């Protein structure tokens, strides 16, 4: 069974499983399926609004696609999540990307 099938099976049983949802999004990204990845990141954030890596990786994906305004919004929301979860490392990385996108 490939990674996407395995992760999808886990998510069928538990759609809120953050680890599986993040893994699925990342696998879609790895395979060049950016839109599917973004859908999974958005679903992940819906179910787990404090899952900071989802904001960071989806913002990077949006930026690579030239969707700067969406990336900026995602980063700002991610910075709020990083603040709530006391994750200064992720906040620093997201702030750097935000600064790059808004120069």
Image: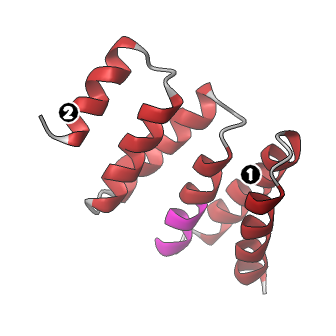
- State the separation of the CA atoms marked 1 and 2: 28 Å
* Helix, strand or loop at mark 2: helix
- Which residue was labeled with disc 2? 5
Residue that lies at the very extreme toward the top in this rendered image: 13
Q: Residue at x 61, y 30 (%)?
A: 46
Look at the image and tell me in which quarter the C terminus lies: bottom right
Q: Residue at x 70, y 33 (%)?
A: 49
Give the camera-side residue of 50 and 42: 50
Magenta-span inclusion, residue 25: no
Q: For the residue carrying disc 2, how many other residues have a C-alpha within 10 Å: few (<14), some (14-19), or many (20+)?
A: few
Q: Residue at x 86, y 46 (%)?
A: 86
Q: Quadrant of residue 95?
A: bottom right
Look at the image and tell me in which quarter the N terminus lies: top left
Looking at the picture, how far across and down is residue 57, in whole percent? Answer: 55, 58
Of helix, strand and loop, which mostly describes the magenta segment?
A: helix
Give the camera-side residue of 76 and 89: 89
Q: For the residue carrying disc 1, how many other residues have a C-alpha within 10 Å: few (<14), some (14-19), or many (20+)?
A: many
Q: Which residues are magenta?
A: 59-65
Q: Residue at x 56, y 66 (%)?
A: 60
- Which residue was labeled with disc 1? 78
* Helix, strand or loop at mark 1: helix
Q: Relative to 23, say whether 35 is above or below.
A: below
Horizontally, is 82 left or right of 70 in the view?
A: right
Looking at the picture, how far across and down is residue 84, in whole percent? Answer: 87, 40
Looking at the picture, how far across and down is residue 85, in whole percent? Answer: 82, 40
Horizontally, is 88 left or right of 38 in the view?
A: right
Residue that lies at the very extreme toward the bottom in this rendered image: 103
Q: Quadrant of residue 79?
A: bottom right
């Amino acid at each position: 069974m490939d990674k996407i099938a395995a992760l999808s099976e886990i998510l069928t049983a538990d759609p809120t499983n953050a680890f599986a949802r993040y893994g699925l999004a990342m696998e879609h990204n790895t395979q060049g399926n950016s839109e599917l990845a973004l859908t999974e990141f958005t679903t992940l954030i819906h179910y787990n609004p404090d899952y900071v890596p989802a904001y960071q990786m989806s913002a990077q994906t949006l930026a690579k696609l030239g969707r700067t305004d969406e990336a900026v919004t995602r980063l700002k929301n991610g910075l709020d999540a990083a603040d709530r979860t006391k994750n200064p490392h992720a906040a620093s990385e997201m702030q750097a990307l935000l600064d790059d996108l808004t120069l």
